[in-house]
Amino acid sequence: PLCDEEGNLVDVADARRSHRVPLLEPEMTGLELEFVVDCIERNWISSQGEYVGRFEEQFEEMHRGTYALAVSNGTVGLHLALHSLGIGRGDEVIVPDITFAATINAVLYCNATPVLCEINSDTLCIDVGEAEKLITNRTKAMIPVHLYGQPCDMDAIRDIAKKNNITVIEDCAEALGSSWRNQPVGVFGDAAVFSFFGNKTISTGEGGMVLFKSREVYECAKILRDHGMNPNRKYWHDHIGFNYRLTNIQAAIGVAQMARREGIFLRKKKIAALYTKFLTGVEWISKLPPIMPETNHSSWLYTVLLDERVNRDDVITKLLMYGIESRPVFYPLHTMPPYKKFLQSNSLKNSIAAASCGLSLPSAVGMSNDTISYVVECLNDVIAIQ
């Protein structure tokens, strides 16, 4: 039963979920099961097996000029990238104030100091001009986050990085399929990290991929990923390493997902285009995802900013009564207890505004056009009774 705040029945959700619209969910309709069964039948279920290498090769083919390393999740990928690039104690790393906590946590894992930066009010990505103001003689890296699939201004970021000798690690966790000036995100920085969590465009349940520009750094990271063990001398450890490996079973799912990635990317774009068609000009929306000529937005999660007169949290609650999942934009990092002390700017008004009125709508690749229409219809009903 789906009830309102007074406990009155308003709808029902059945076992087939015909009245439930998930925010995101994976679509496993290709060769995923066949490849997993292949792993089990041949007993290659841990980090050894051909699918890990195949998965890495698929990413190298998609992101020319990089070296790919599969890892157990996107968070450890960020840590491994920072550590392998020499980021450590005493170093400052600029991160956007609006992002998932994994971005800043990875910096702290390295004992480095995160510096929180304002976001652009249109793209919700890091404000490059504000980032430049935060650079000091201790700044060693910047982590631009392609939030919800929206590419950052990588030309400006690379210019600043080159001028100030700063390392760039792209957080592409939500942006597989996005591109900047006809090049896929992930090829612009010294390293880039992708996530394959269950809600991502390509999913392996858990998992991640790190791309490196430097062969030398890649080889170092490859050793560190496997306990710091000498690849030519079994059980001899030259470094203090980590157990950050991806299993062959997870990679098998990834290989199957990547084989049909273009169809998945296309459907995600069509979902976003339909939302935009329905929501353009609606008075209770202040901003839709921007369409910029130099970018290809992968539309991982369709996110709008509501008019400030609308109670966003109330909308989320009421949509759930219709069986529709939605979610708010991330809390600004500077507002949460572990990260308050890393605030160096007096004004983060864009971050605060986005967090207070940002709403992410269902964006699962398996959504039908009728379901999108239903979501918009329910949105209109919910906001009409505010």
Image (cartoon, helix red, strand yellow):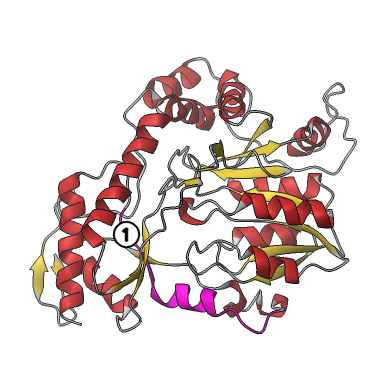
Q: Where 293 falls versus 217 (above or below)? A: below
Q: Nearer the viewer, residue 325 or 385?
A: 385
Estimate the x, y position of residue 133 in percent, counting from the top left: 74, 71
Dividing the picture into quarters, in which one does residue 44 lie?
Answer: top right
164 versus 305 height, above or below? above
Amino acid at the residue labelled 1: Leu
Q: Position of residue 255 (x, y in %)?
A: 49, 26
Q: Which residues are magenta?
A: 345-362
* Residue labelled with disc 1: 361
x, y percentage for residue 155?
65, 50
Q: Residue at x 47, y 78 (%)?
A: 353
- Indicate the position of residue 163 as horizontal and vertical percent values: 81, 55
Q: Is residue 115 rendered to the left or right of residue 173?
A: right
Q: Residue furthest front?
A: 293
- Residue 61's place in the image compared with 291, above or below, is above
Residue 139 figure quarter: bottom right
Q: Nearer the viewer, residue 268 or 237?
A: 268
Q: Quadrant of residue 344?
A: bottom right
